[in-house]
Image: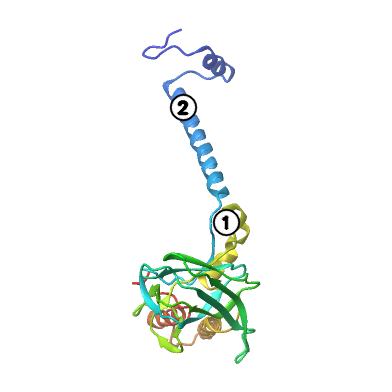
Amino acid sequence: MRFSGYSRLNERETFLLRIHGLRWTPATTAMTRMRAALAGALVALIVALVVVGARRQPQIASTDRVPNYTFVTEIFAGQSLCQGNEIVPVGTAALRMTIGTYGKPGPPLVIRVTGPVSAATGARTVAIARGKLAEGWLQGVISVPVSRVAQTHAEARVCIANRGLWPVAIAGTTPPANYGFDDYLNGKPLASEVRIDYMLPGRPSWFSMLGKARDADDVRQGHLHRLDGVDRAAAADARAWRRAGARAAARGARGMSGRSITPAAAFACVRRTLARLHVPPTGAR
């Protein structure tokens, strides 16, 4: 049988159509081809996800989010740069920075990470991790191996000491951008801040990271479940909001007139909270 304007159906298509009680139309063939194309695309997507997820590469446990567009701090021979208020996540096995050597072989570097034993004021400082880089490395994005960090530390201090004979420069940012870190060069305060990435050991795959994705994201954003420093300020703001809402609800229930929370006051409260959380300014990336 020949359909007007269309080619003859093959025996298999005719058989399947008869079984299901369907009549052949141009739309029937078009729909079949569309479903086959969608199924092929889905299979290709699944294969691509498997390939990407199984790929092993260096993974970041956390970063301080400071841009590293330019070199901002020079560390001369014998000097030490320290950056405070860092959050060092559990599992860190290396610190990654962009370091320039002015074209010379890299000098030996020593890294020390310290922090308070607790959130209490005046708590003693202990060593968190230590590492070094031997002389002869090439400038660029450098990972310095350190002893593995056993637990997450907030308000940590990272110090990089130059034990060589020539200076190095570390990339970061300068004002007006401010990410809330305290930098000192041999005890002298600096306005600049440097970029530090905290790397996991080895080359884990994305699949192996799935169970840690949420924790890593919390650390990356600095949202630690603690009530000291930044989080204490944020919690205070949240309590103030709740008290204000409760007062407004009570006034409404009594039918009393009173001042409500104005948009300006709400915006000011949000700005204070963001400033305490060290959210970068709009112009910074």
Q: Nearest the camera: 169 or 215?
A: 169
Q: Residues within 10 Å of mark 1 (few under 14, many from 20)?
A: few
Residue 77 left/right relative to 118: left
Residue flagged by tag 2: what amino acid is it?
Arg
Question: Which element type, helix, strand or loop, lies under badge 1?
Answer: loop
Q: Is residue 15 depicted above or below 61 in this figure? A: above
The percent coordinates of residue 223 (x first, y second) are: 55, 73
Residue at 42 percent across and 78 percent down: it is: 193
* Residue linked to disc 2: 33
Q: Can residue 178 be seen by looking at this rendering?
A: no
The percent coordinates of residue 37 (x first, y second) are: 47, 32
The quadrant the C terminus occupies is bottom left
* C-alpha distance separating marks 2 and 1: 42 Å
| Disc nearest the viewer among 2 and 1 | 1
Q: Are marks 2 and 1 in contact (CB under 8 Å)?
A: no
Q: Is residue 18 depicted above or below 161 in this figure? A: above
**Dividing the picture into quarters, in which one does residue 257 lie?**
bottom left
Residue 73 left/right relative to 157: left
The percent coordinates of residue 276 (x first, y second) are: 47, 81
Q: Nearest the camera: 215 or 124?
A: 124
Question: Which element type, helix, strand or loop, lies under badge 2?
Answer: helix
Q: Can residue 25 be seen by looking at this rendering?
A: yes
Residue at 44 percent across and 69 percent down: it is: 106
Residue flagged by tag 1: what amino acid is it?
Arg
Question: How many callouts does the rendering have?
Answer: 2
* Residue linked to disc 1: 203
**Dividing the picture into quarters, in which one does residue 264 lie?**
bottom left
Residue located farthest toward the top when viewing the structure as drawn: 1
